[in-house]
Image (cartoon, rainbow, N blue to C red):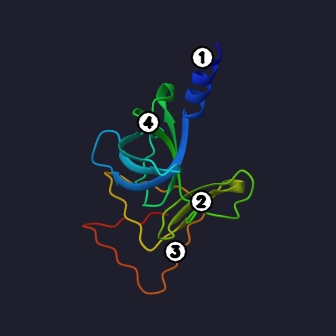
Amino acid sequence: MSQVTDDTRSRVDMGIVRGFVTRSNSATYSQRLQMSLLSNEAKDNVEHLEPYGFTARPLEGAELVGHSIGGNRDHVVVTTVADRRYRVRDLEAGEVALYTHEGATFTMKNEQVVELKCKKVEITCDEFTLKCKKLTIEASDSIDVTSPSVDVNS
């Protein structure tokens, strides 16, 4: 009986793994990671399962949490990758942010305020509509408009 208990305990202990990303490949249907586990164990071609609608290619050194299916280290899937080196800090309770290692941020702040900080915004779409009560445009250098026609209505 103790053999079964020891085997079960071992499988549970090996069920959750923690480590670091050493390489990533986002060209596949499910992103693949190479990882170094905290026990100095290396794993390659590990599936990174991401939430629907969100994807990010982690940098080398990002931290991860993976799961060994059935405690089998030959079948690891990664469900969480985080990078505390670049994480947005000092959010108020309830606020949400997306960020990159270069400092671009998209923050949904309290009181329904959305803040975008970046060097350049590119939007490609068939139609773009902006509805607001007041629109303020500030350009410290210039404003360029290229269009076959411009309609201004009041």
Q: Could you tell which of marks 3 and 2 lies nearer the N-terminus?
A: 2
* C-alpha separation, residue under disc 1 versus residue under disc 3: 69 Å
Q: Is residue 149 above or below residue 44?
A: below
The relative height of residue 67 versus residue 107 in the rendered view (above or below) is: above
- Where residue 8 appears, as percent x and y from the top left, is 59, 22
Badge 2: residue crowd in 10 Å (few <14, some 14–19, many ≥20): some
Pointer 1 with pointer 3, Cβ within 8 A: no
What residue is at 62 percent from the left and 24 percent from the top? 6
Q: At label 2, which amino acid type do we have?
A: Thr
- Decide if residue 109 is on the left or right side of residue 37: right
Q: Which amino acid does label 3 sit on?
A: Ile
Of residues 122 and 25, the one nearer the viewer is 25
Cα distance in 3D space between marks 4 and 3: 50 Å
Label 1, label 2: how far apart the Cα atoms are: 50 Å
Secondary element at image label 3: loop
Residue bearing the label numbered 1 = 4
**Numbered tag placed on residue 76 in the rendering:** 4
Image coordinates of residue 2 in percent, x first then y, are: 65, 17
Residue 68: image location, x then y, percent: 48, 33
Lower sequence index among marks 1 and 3? 1
Marker disc for residue 107:
2
Q: Nearer the viewer, mark 1 or mark 3?
A: 1
Q: Nearer the viewer, mark 1 or mark 4?
A: 1
- Mark in the foreground, 4 or 3: 4
Circle 3 residue: 137
Q: Residue furthest right?
A: 93
Does label 4 or label 2 sit earlier along the sequence? Answer: 4
Q: In which quarter of the image is residue 114?
A: bottom right
